[in-house]
Image (spheres, coloured by chain):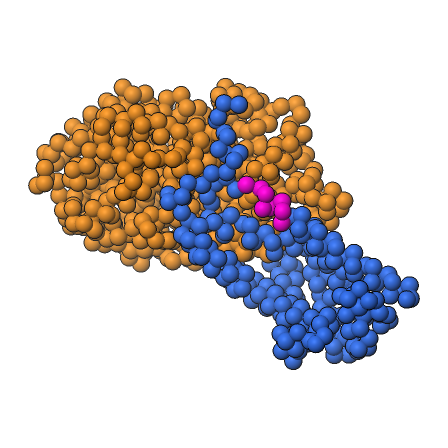
Chain colours: A orange, B blue
Amino acid sequence: MAKPAFETPRIPDFPEIPVIVEGAMAHSRPFVAAPDHQEALGFPGELVDDWHDTAIAKMGEMLGKYRGLRVFLDSCVKCGACTDKCHYFLGTSDPKNMPVARQDLLRKVYRRHFTLAGRLFPKLVGAADLTEEVLEDWYRYFHQCSQCRRCSVFCPYGIDTAEVSMAGREILASIGLGQKYSNEIIGKVHKIGNNLGLPQPALADTLEGLEEDVEDDTGVSVRFPLDEAGAEVLLVTPSADFFAEPHVDGLIGYGKVFHQAGIRWTLSTKASEAANFGLFIGSYENMRKVARRIREAALELGVKRIVFGECGHAWRVAYSFLHTLAGPFDFLDPRYPVPQHIIEVTHDLIRRDALTLDRSANDERRITFHDSCNVARASRMGDTPGGQFTLPREVLRAVCNHFFDMAPDTTGESTFCCGGGGGLLTDDLVELRVKGALPRMQAFKEVVERNQVTHIAAICAICKSQFAKVLPYYGFEMDQILSVHQLVGDAIVLGGND
Amino acid sequence: MSILTAACTFALYAAVVVLVAGLARKIVQYARTPAPLKIPTTPAPVTRTGVAGRLAREVVLFESLFKASKWTWLFGWVFHAALLVVLVGHLRYFTEPVWLPAALVQGIAPYAGIAMLAGLAGLWARRFLVDRVRYISAPSDHLMLALLVAIGATGVAMRFGVHTDIVALKAFALGLVRFDWQPIPTDAVLLLHLAFVAALMVLFPFSKLLHAPGLFFSPTRNQADDPRERRHVTPWAARVGEPR
């Protein structure tokens, strides 16, 4: 690894709100999407000549399509409640990473073009024209937001910066300035079926290898079926689960759960990806197209239930948007929610005593749990509000003896993003990712010191990859991040009921 | 009728018309703009009744702001609560016999005026003292506070020092309501007070004061968390991907 050109922040003894440092992250901008990747998604290949007018027209169109955007741009009173809530601000000190200041990049142009006050008295009300400099700020700072919604918890009007940065990114893409990482990946999903571009034979090969590994380890033949028509459950999981560490250990865990519960399940080539990067770029059209694959796969395979693997933003799109984007799902078994989270499946089996679990299998590990941002603040599990916090913890407590929560202002609805969400999990943004992880690393360090915690468990592919990358920057080991279902898989006592 | 009375009468009517029409225009715009996706900030209530409760807590208690910053909450809540008391108290000028709630708050309304100023002072101080809030403040943010302070200060001044002819003022106010116009007292402080209030009413629908109706239309706060139980579709979103 080349020596990083930045300094990893020092973890202070107590959380600190930094003094602002203007321009501290002005150099951070991800690679722009190549013309091919832009055009594949229906966007212009490069910056269009009349980008200014096109951008303003696009903004006008979106103001008419999204009530949230309109209300959020009008309502902010600049009270400052959000200013110390964003992990990127806390980690970088750049004032444009304060949620309100990030929104203001769009709001000042909105005011100039769409409000009377901004048209008449731009200087007075902080309105500004969309200059090249402002456009450059849009590209930089709308790609320094992981759309984690922490600010929206604390805003007295519920203003959600994620909505604003998504709108900003959609405007940017529609004038030719898409982001390489997200758009390239969406192209792969449209074309092949998953973010990694793994074709069917590679997938089949990988799953076969997994079956052999599990049999070698346990002596039990646990199946990892692909494209099996007539299965009861279609499992849609992030493609990182097929090969990356620690993700793949989670996939093994899901397989063991289904095996022990006697549920016939299958993966699908067509829907071999749970993530929906259409969300990250704010494009309803792309989000819908990616979501429809899941419906098609479910119909083709004739399954009765759809279950999602461990993935944060994916679960948001699945839980909150799947019905809207790809419903109705009247062809599925009405006794189960559509879709279900794998945690809900496992939790239900544990509650019904359908799994034999040996907690002591995880006795070497002392575990804490990272609430993934989009699971925490944009979805739910189970029947009651807050189930997204209680269910994973109940599963963890059922499979390990040593569980410790991080500080309450860093968990639950106040959880800090891992620093890599929302389309930022790319090497061209590594400085941002490392610095944005500071608040989470601080909370982790505290439980490491207080409770001798050894591992952090997560239910999101992005969180897992991000932590594996940034933990070493803060003096931890990359393998201290685990999948929740890895812990489940290790505690399950196989056999006995087949 | 004197020119002054005519001008004040006309200005106040005009301000009310701008306020009502401007707000109505924005409320219609918000109501007509679709919300294509379910985006409540979770954990969120799962029923409409629950949502009403959540909104009520935001409006009455400033629940989210309380989670965010205790100082901002304290200043903001004191200002808004005191403003409400003051507004209710002012209804005694427009009702005869005096509306009961207006009569009930009469004893505390003057002190509410002072509390209102204290809240505003706290909010304004933050714009200078906290570097983050200083960074995000535009001139209009300071001017809005200045206007509110001017309204409060002239009001408190009349109550505790430079009294105006309250009987004549009430006749003028009732005249406005009954379209039976009466002369306005000519005290400078009163005229300033009314001019500032008229300015605030005119600014309301064109400024950040839109946070008041905005909260009720904020999808992160006004949506129920029920996307798995109820399919949420809006017309433009339903048409995406269909053959044209």
Q: Position of residue B159 (x, y in %)?
A: 74, 77
Inspect this view and state whether residue A311 appears: yes
B123 lies above or below A51:
below
Residue drawn 48% across and 33% down? B238
Specify the farthest residue to the right. Answer: B2
Inspect this view and state whether residue A429 appears: no
The quadrant in which the N terminus of chain A is found is top left
Q: Which quarter of the picture shows residue A458?
A: top left
Q: Going by the image, does A464 lie left or right of A171? A: left
Q: Position of residue B167 (x, y in %)?
A: 80, 77
Span colored in magenta: B27-34
Q: Main secondary structure of the magenta part?
A: helix
The quadrant in which the C terminus of chain A is found is top left
Residue drawn 65% across and 33% down? A56
A13 lies above or below B192:
above
Residue drawn 18% across and 42% down? A490
Viewer-nearest residue: A125 or A139: A125
Total residue callouts: 0
Q: Going by the image, does A172 lie left or right of A208? A: right
Residue A117 forms part of the magenta stretch: no
Residue drawn 91% across and 63% down? B3
Q: Position of residue A378 (x, y in %)?
A: 42, 46
A261 lies above or below B172:
above
Q: Going by the image, does B93 lie left or right of B127? A: right
Q: Position of residue A325 (x, y in %)?
A: 43, 34
